[in-house]
């Protein structure tokens, strides 16, 4: 058991590929998809006795594809950190507040024994995936794609000058109307694509934010990478700010018992800087959309849309991100207050657990899982200054608290956190992952 736990926190090499060969393969895959889509469109037109047509507009991405030097070679990663990104990027809700606290820990419990290394290279543990097939195996690949894709995207942002906490905001929540205040039916998604995440990080001040787009793919076969990246490029082209494309990263993670590797390309664009505020976050202004190219959508596919972002939509998306943070640490009342259509005060939950680690106070939720004679105590929370800022319902205060943690405490606490399991009396071991925005995840295995 200690071997599996060690594999979660030990720094291990992950091979990363981003070069001209990959760019050429991705572009060829996009051209092949466009040709295939055109043939299918013509076939439908012939059967309907309509004039010949061509592929939907979103098959014709004009983005310039570039390699990503910071994501080529070898990356040193801790799987525990990747699982923290997975838990944050793919939260599960529930009708019961108590059960929701359990369901949000699914990423840790599912993949605790999933990793191994061979000759310093990160791989999936063969015994963990030996009897996982078909849809279930595809689901594992998808989860690894998100976990390590988000982790790599943050490395990409930092290599390009980003400082402070980097957040992955789910685009789907925006398009579903969770933030925009519209029912999902208001947006015709036929023939439309959208990326997974909008990456957000501070620019010149905590409330001055820069944004990039991220699409994560996961596969167990290296032969599928080019096609996956080609599709990802079309997806990241669907979000616009003031009519301009937003800089983006497309990643594909290959995960199997022989390798976990990263493949990425960077469609060039300039990152917009947007000022966000509490006032804008509760604005009733709605989401706008614009046609990709009039007349390019076929009748079968429906209209081809891009979604136009502005400072009001961005602020509301930041509000959703903060709501997810409050839910992650276990304060569902504060989380729901951030999601309401109008601002109203709320008190910090008394159900939060307070604990002290690395000389600092943390507030969050704790669950205990026991199997036979072994138990696991899972604590997920955030630094007390960040959690108290969440209860203020002031977006500026939350962003400032996150930036202050990153600027004053993160490096020190990170230095005290071990890349080996801590072994203490009464415990088999304990492992920790920490984010620069003050989020912490700690698992203690008890004998």
Image: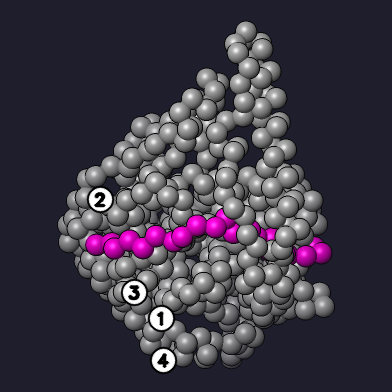
- Disc 2 designates what residue? 340
Residue 183 shows in this picture: yes
- 1 or 3: mark nearer the eye: 3
Which badge, 1 or 3, comes first in the chain's sequence? 3
State the residue at coordinates (63%, 59%).
66
For disc 1, the neighbor class at 10 Å (few under 14, some 14 to 19, many from 20) is some
Marks 1 and 3 sit apart, C-alpha to C-alpha, by 15 Å
Comparing labels 1 and 2, the label whose residue is closer to the camera:
1
- Residue drawn at 35 percent across, 42 percent down: 177
Residue 14 can be seen in this image: no
Mark 4 or mark 3: whose residue is earlier in sequence: 3
Residue that carries the numbered disc 3 in the rendered image: 204
Marks 2 and 3, Cα distance to the nearest angstrom? 29 Å
- Magenta range is 257-277
Out of 96 and 255, give the one closest to the viewer. Answer: 255
Q: Which label is found at residue 406?
A: 1
């Amino acid at each position: 058991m200690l071997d599996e736990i060690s594999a979660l926190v030990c720094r291990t090499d992950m091979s990363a590929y981003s070069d001209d060969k990959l760019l050429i393969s991705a572009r060829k895959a996009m051209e092949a998809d466009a040709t295939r889509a055109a043939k299918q469109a013509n076939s439908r037109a012939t059967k309907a006795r309509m004039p010949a047509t061509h592929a939907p507009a979103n098959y014709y991405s004009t983005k310039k594809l570039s390699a990503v030097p910071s994501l080529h070679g070898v990356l040193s990663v801790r799987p525990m950190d990747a699982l923290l990104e997975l838990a944050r990027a793919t939260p599960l809700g529930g009708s019961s507040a108590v059960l929701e606290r359990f369901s949000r820990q699914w990423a840790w419990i599912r993949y605790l024994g999933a990793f191994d290394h061979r000759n310093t290279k990160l791989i999936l543990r063969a015994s963990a995936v030996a009897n996982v097939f078909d849809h279930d195996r595809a689901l594992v690949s998808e989860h690894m794609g998100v976990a390590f894709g988000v982790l790599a995207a943050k490395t990409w942002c930092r290599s390009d000058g980003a400082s402070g906490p980097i957040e992955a905001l789910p685009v789907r929540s925006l398009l579903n109307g969770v933030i925009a205040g519209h029912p999902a039916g208001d947006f015709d998604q036929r023939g439309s694509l959208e990326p997974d995440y909008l990456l957000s990080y501070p620019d010149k001040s905590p409330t001055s934010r820069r944004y990039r787009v991220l699409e994560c793919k996961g596969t167990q076969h290296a032969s599928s990478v080019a096609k996956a990246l080609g599709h990802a490029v079309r997806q990241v082209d669907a979000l616009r700010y003031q009519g301009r494309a937003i800089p983006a990263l497309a990643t594909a993670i290959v995960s199997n018992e022989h390798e976990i590797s990263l493949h990425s390309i960077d469609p060039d664009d300039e990152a917009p800087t947007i000022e966000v505020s509490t006032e804008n976050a509760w604005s009733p202004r709605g989401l706008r959309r614009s046609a990709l190219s009039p007349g390019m959508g076929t009748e079968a596919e429906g209209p081809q849309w891009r979604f136009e972002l502005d400072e009001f939509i961005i602020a509301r998306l930041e509000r959703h991100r903060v709501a997810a943070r409050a839910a992650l640490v276990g304060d569902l009342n504060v989380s729901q207050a951030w999601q309401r259509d109008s601002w109203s005060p709320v008190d910090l939950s008394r159900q939060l657990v307070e604990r002290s680690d690395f000389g600092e106070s943390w507030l969050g939720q704790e669950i205990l899982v026991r199997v036979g004679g072994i138990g696991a105590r899972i604590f997920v929370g955030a630094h007390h200054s960040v959690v108290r800022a969440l209860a203020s319902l002031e977006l500026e205060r939350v962003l400032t608290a996150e930036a202050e943690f990153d600027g004053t405490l993160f490096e020190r606490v990170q230095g005290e956190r071990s890349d080996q399991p801590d072994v203490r009396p009464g415990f088999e071991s304990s492992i920790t992952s920490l984010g620069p925005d003050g989020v912490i995840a700690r698992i203690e295995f008890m004998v």
